[in-house]
Image (spheres, rainbow, N blue to C red):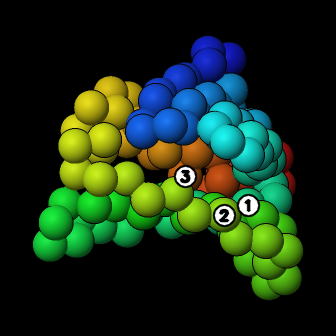
Amino acid sequence: MTDEITARAGREFYTFDGRILEVFGSHPRRFHIRNMDLRVTGPDRKGRRTVEIVAGSPEASAAQHTWHHSAEEWQRAQGLEALLEAVRAGIASAREYGA
C-alpha cells in the first residue's frame, strides 16, 4: 500500500500509510503495525464507539491508548472505518509474513 488514508473523528485526525498509524489531537501518537494491536468496540446503546490501540507486542503490551467517539462523530467520520480496517489488515499481514 502506498497511498495514505486519512479520516477525522471528533478532535482526532487519523492517517495511515500502510505501516504507520498516526493520530493527531491534543496528544499526537504514532504506531507501527508490527508493534500494536487495534480494537474497535461498539456501538453501545447510545451509538458510541471506542477505538483502542495497545502499543507493544500482544504478549507484552507497553501502553494502551483509547479514543471515544459519539454516534454523531462516528457518522461524520468519513473514511474512518475503512482506515481502521486497513490498519487491521496491515497488522494481520505483518504478523503473518513478518513484514
Give residue 65's mark.
2
Front-most of 95 and 17?
17
Kindly identify which residue carries mark 3. 88
Q: Secondary structure at mark 2?
A: strand
Residue 50: % across, % down: 42, 63
Rounded to the nearest whole Å, what is the CA distance between mark 2 and mark 3?
Answer: 16 Å
Q: Measuring 68% from the left and 26% from the top, which residue is drawn there?
A: 17
Q: Residue furthest left?
A: 45
Query: Nearer the viewer's eye, disc 2 or disc 3?
Result: 2
Report whether residue 83 is seen: no
Horizontal arrangement in the rendering, residue 79 relative to residue 33 (left or right): left
Q: Measuring 85% from the left and 74% from the top, which residue is drawn there?
A: 62
Residue 94: % across, % down: 74, 52
Marks 2 & 1, CB-CB < 8 Å contact: no
Rounded to the nearest whole Å, what is the CA distance between mark 2 and mark 1?
Answer: 11 Å
Residue 60, picture quadrant: bottom right
Q: Secondary structure at mark 3?
A: helix
- Packing grade of label 2 (10 A; few <14, some 14-19, many >=20) is few
For badge 3, the amino acid type reads Arg
Front-most of 46 and 15?
46
Residue 82, relative to residue 29: is it above or below?
Answer: above
Residue 84, relative to residue 80: is it above or below?
Answer: below
Horizontal arrangement in the rendering, residue 46 relative to residue 53 (left or right): left
Front-most of 67 and 96?
67
Q: Earlier in the sequence, mark 2 or mark 3?
A: 2
- Packing grade of label 3 (10 A; few <14, some 14-19, many >=20) is some
Rounded to the nearest whole Å, what is the CA distance between mark 3 and mark 1?
Answer: 10 Å
Report whether residue 73 is seen: yes
Kindly identify which residue carries mark 1. 36
Q: Measuring 16% from the left and 66% from the top, which residue is drawn there?
A: 46
For badge 1, the amino acid type reads Met
- Quadrant assignment for the N terminus: top right
